Image: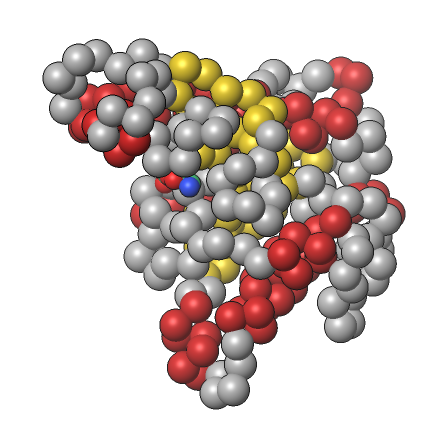
Amino acid sequence: MDDPSTATLPPRRLAVLISGEGTNLQALINAQNTLSLPNTCIVLVLSNRKNARGLIHASTTLPLIPTAYLSLQPFLKSNLGKTLEDYNVEVAHIVLHAKPDAVVCAGFMHIVSEGFLDVFKGTRILEGKEVLAREVPMINIHPALFGQFDGFEAFQKGEVDELGIMVHCVVKEVDHGEPLIQRRVKVVKEEAIEAYEERLHKVEWEIIVEATWIVLDEVQLPLSSNSSS
Ligand code: GAR
């Protein structure tokens, strides 16, 4: 159901970056245009892995969600002389082309460069692209609490005694941005990692939607309403 207060605004546009199963993407797909993510549509799903199951979720949703695939190694092989940074720029080009109001990394297993982040901050302008009217916020979901890097692995090594999940703003230090939301997920002694992951996922699907709404709600004027297409 649409929120009447947002009904006259153009929909907020979301780009989602994935690499794998896409269960968090599916949570966002289910939430778009509901009270959890009112007046929102996913305008691009980009994967850096060809066989990412999340690409299937996007292409079997009605209306269809545009998808893109760009993997580092094939990119470098078919563009001799190009670098990792060129790959980052190419990904940024594809994402910007979709004119997102926010970008969500939902299990995107590529470490984006500082230059990539600068593009979305609006401090670096890509060739052929216009100056951004404002920063495009980018968030990431990571299966650990703030300050813990490895989550379950750290727990098994006895390095941490509690675990959780956070959604944070993407910064150049991998998985280290200040959390927008984090939840503790109690670890049951001797629990198999599969069982823990199942419980963790359920929490992820809630908080990825909540955090996405936090950033989209702050986007007062959708970037897309300034543009010609
Ligand atoms: C999620 O568990 C997410 O927390 C994790 O990848 C998984 C993706 O699952 N992210 C990271 O590890 C980021 N460093 P999904 O493809 O089913 O959404």
Query: Is residue 120 shown left or right of residue 67?
Result: right
**Against 191, is 152 above or below?**
below
Q: Residue at x 38, y 45 (%)?
A: 54
Question: Where residue 19 sits in the image (x, y, percent)?
Answer: 39, 50
Q: Residue placed at 74% from the left, 67% from the top?
A: 126
Of residues 159 and 122, the one drawn nearer to the viewer in this rendering: 159
Q: From the viewer's side, name the closer residue of 73 and 175.
A: 175
In the picture, measured across the screen, residue 77 lies left or right of residue 85, that is: left
Query: Which quadrant does the N terminus fall into?
Result: top right
Quarter containing the C terminus: bottom right
Whether residue 39 can be seen here: no
Tell me which residue sits at (74%, 49%) in the image: 121
Q: Is residue 123 in sight in this rendering?
A: yes
Q: Residue at x 69, y 30 (%)?
A: 216
Residue lying at the far front of the rendered structure: 159
| Rendering quadrant holding ligand 1 | top left
Q: Which scheme is used to colour this image of the protein?
A: secondary structure
Classify 87 as above or below 111: below
Q: Vertically, is 158 above or below 83?
A: above
Counting from the top left corner in percent of width and height, residue 38 is at: 65, 23
Q: Is residue 17 left or right of residue 228?
A: left
Relative image position of residue 35 (x, y in whole percent): 61, 16
Q: Quadrant of residue 25?
A: top left
Q: Is residue 187 above or below residue 87?
A: above
- Number of numbered labels in the structure image: 0
| Quarter location, residue 191 | top left
Residue 96: % across, % down = 68, 56
Closer to us: 228 or 192: 192
**Left or right of 16: which side holds 40?**
right
